[in-house]
Amino acid sequence: MSIRHLDSMFEPASVAVFGASDRAASVGATVWRNLQQGRFAAQGGRLYAVNPRQPVLDHGMPAFADVAALPEAPELAVLCTPPATVPRLIAELGARGTRAAVVLTAGFSTAQKQAMLDAARPHVLRILGPNCLGLLNPHLGLNASFSHIDAQPGTLAFVSQSGALVTGLLDWAAGRGIGFSRFVSLGEHADVDFADLLDHLASDAKTRAILLYIESIDDARKFVSAARAAARNKPVLVVKAGRSSLGQRAAASHTGALAASDLVFDAAIRRAGMLRVDTLDDLFIAAQTLAHHRALPSGGGDADTQARLERLSRLTLLTNGGGAGVLAADAAAAAGVELTELGPATVAALDRVLPGNWSRGNPVDIIGDAPVQRYVDAVQALQAGPEAGALLFMHAPTAIVPSAEIAAALLPLLQPPRTQALACWLGDAAVRDARRRFQAGGVPTYDTPEQAVRAFAMLQTYRRNQDELMQTPPAAIAPAWDLAAVRAPIDAALAAGRGMLTEPEAKAVLAACGISVAGTREVAADAEAAVQSAQQIGFPVALKILSPQISHKSDVGGVALDLEDADAVRHAATAMLQRVRQLRPDATQLGFSVQAMVRRPRALELIVGAVLDPLFGPVLLFGAGGTAVEVVADRAVALPPLNAPLARALVQRTRIARLLAGWRDVPPADIDAVVQVLTTLSQLLADEPRIVEIDINPLLADAAGVVALDARIRVDAAAPGGAARFAIRPYPSHLVETVDWQGRALTLRPIRPEDEPQHLDFLAQLDPLDVRMRVFYSRRSIEHSELARLTQIDYDREMAFIATAALPGGGEETLGVARAATDPDNITAEFAIVVRSDLKGGGLGLLLMRKLIDHQRAHGTQRLVGTVLNENRRMLELARELGFLVEAADPADADGDADTQRVVLPLR
């Protein structure tokens, strides 16, 4: 991932257009006209036309013959020339000093595209395109595209793979007064891709939210890593084409068939903390909503915060007309939005201020003749209620009171953090002023009740996704299971030339991982052998065919249940062999599996599995199981690694989760046991890269726990899976080490989310002066969201090593932390280190810094840098001892600080 020279692409001082022309309707003429007519040139931007066949364009504007003839190296080049000319031009521009190019040309062959990239690489010249519409930076007045319309300045960045969509959306947005900070057409994204632009836009001060239209991505880990980093800073909203694919790849298991690629992309968006919407209209609705309500707390924190989050997930409807309330309630039911149940105290408070014929429930209908004070009284009563949460205010204009007066009276009451409010002003001219007041006052406003409810539903989805973003699975400590026992059946299958484990082999792998399985024996394809095995197990038994060519046994009558005696087993085995020979003459019959019947009449049949997605790598699946699993299609997928909260969230996204919670006289199933299976499979996928598919169907679950009745595992000797293929990097357990320090055993390890409470205790024990020395200011408290960013990190981009020691009563305490944040190009990492105030001077800082330096060097980082207060002599001495170069800040540097010094350690 790289943001190298993207500043030259989006904020150039000079632009040259190759293929500029005055020929009507040509791409070169359109781009040249757009650049000339924009504010870029009027504000001092330098423009150059390049056309070897046309030395003078319209209005006497000179055109240069080639790169060498230009008076300077243009910071940005826009190429509208034939594909064959582009590699040469890129090479000449790079040699001249140009650092960015937009290639609008289409029709590149694979060889031409590679030649273009090869020409750019020695000069680190960044390329947008080819086959793109171009880019716009409205704040700079830069329109380097062949769009028919310019963009208004604003705070939304839009990035699209579709050029046609770009032009249509620009036209649509102009008519609605929507402005942009960046507008980018990616085209074939041969160089600059979504991940690069996410990195660039995440730190762009003029961008409030990032909107993406995605058709495909090439590098899943790069994309997810960039998306997770950006989504921590600002909302990232996605429209992804292709929800309903006409064709799905063939799969050898139920899991493979169910884990369709679009579901996997959904899972990636969720774990990255982004929000996926279905339409372009929803894209802008969500952007408006999140601009006002994103700062409200996400998951975590104390009990009071959790209680508030619970209330904010429910919606109270306040309206002056019953029809609007009914429409909103219907929309809420359809969207899965829970309405607030008004408590007795709130109803009594409303009784005192509303007419006797008010609705006495939610929706709260205050009647159409309501004056301003009734609106105010109703809102205040709802806010005072113990169940107070989010509020949707709806108003239809009447002749009783002007809408603008109602807006003026309510606006001060509907400001956060007092209330999370949304508004719907029904109508047009009569409510225009009221709608404008609310929008200007920071209350998101919608045209219809359904639109407002949809926005609230998107807000809830976004918050759940943000919670998943903040989850990082716990340390992958050596698993309790016997890895040799896990791997032995896989070794045996591969040695026999089989990619599919038999059912007994698959169950042996699961049992070795601690997953409860139904006891199973494998016998030859002989009826008497099956009888003998059944007698040893004890009746009743289940009998299943074993063949590597038969994945779904029930499809060929390869399953017989509840066999009560030897005759039943003999008859079933004989008939099964005849049936399989007739229906699948190609199948190699290895034999039968015989297992004791598991009778748990109130258990639910689940499916739990994993598949290797070609783009995102290993993916986990959970849902309703059984033979009709594809027909029911109640499933959800997630990207590993999983911890318990992520596994629970996966379960909750299915319909069968409601049955797992119990109903009528059926007690709840053991959800903890289900979660344990999911986290175990996640760990198994990380530890055994030869596994490419797992299918446990059915997994029975009831109050007594879970048991796997059937299982399939497919393997590949090439080991295409494993943690290296995870789209989200798992906890780097290999970096955990134990050291001796002053006679104490310390653990040096990467920080993890579970460390938040002890990290808070650690920060609380720091002397205020030590805090100021490290972060240049003092403070008495730290918010949960800030703690989350310190403990829930993306190990691809940053590292925080903590030193911990065991406490006498159990648990551990944090003694110090050294962290580094790496830029997207992995060139520079900025470090910080804090040691507990009572432990300074004992060499702990040296231990932590050496571990951090070794890690960054192994990670390929080129240099480690830090900013140190002049008065922090101890840190400056430590830096010198470690080989850092100490550079005084330059007072002439606008970014410099005379009170600090910069320390730099070259790592390569």
Image: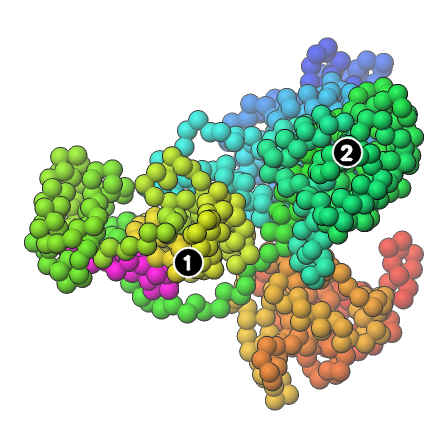
Report whether 117 appears left or right of 58: left
Residue drawn at x 85%, y 39% as measured from the top left:
353
* Quadrant showing the C terminus: bottom right
Q: Of 463 and 133, which appears nearest the observer?
A: 463
Secondary element at tag 1: loop
- Res. 562 visible in picture: yes
Name the residue tied to disc 2.
Answer: 358
Which residue extends farthest top? 24
Residue drawn at x 89%, y 55% as measured from the top left:
893
Residue type at mark 2 is Trp
The magenta segment: 504-523
Residue type at mark 1 is Ala
Q: Is residue 519 magenta?
A: yes
Name the residue tied to disc 1.
Answer: 703
Which residue extends farthest bottom? 743
| Figure label count | 2
Secondary element at tag 2: loop
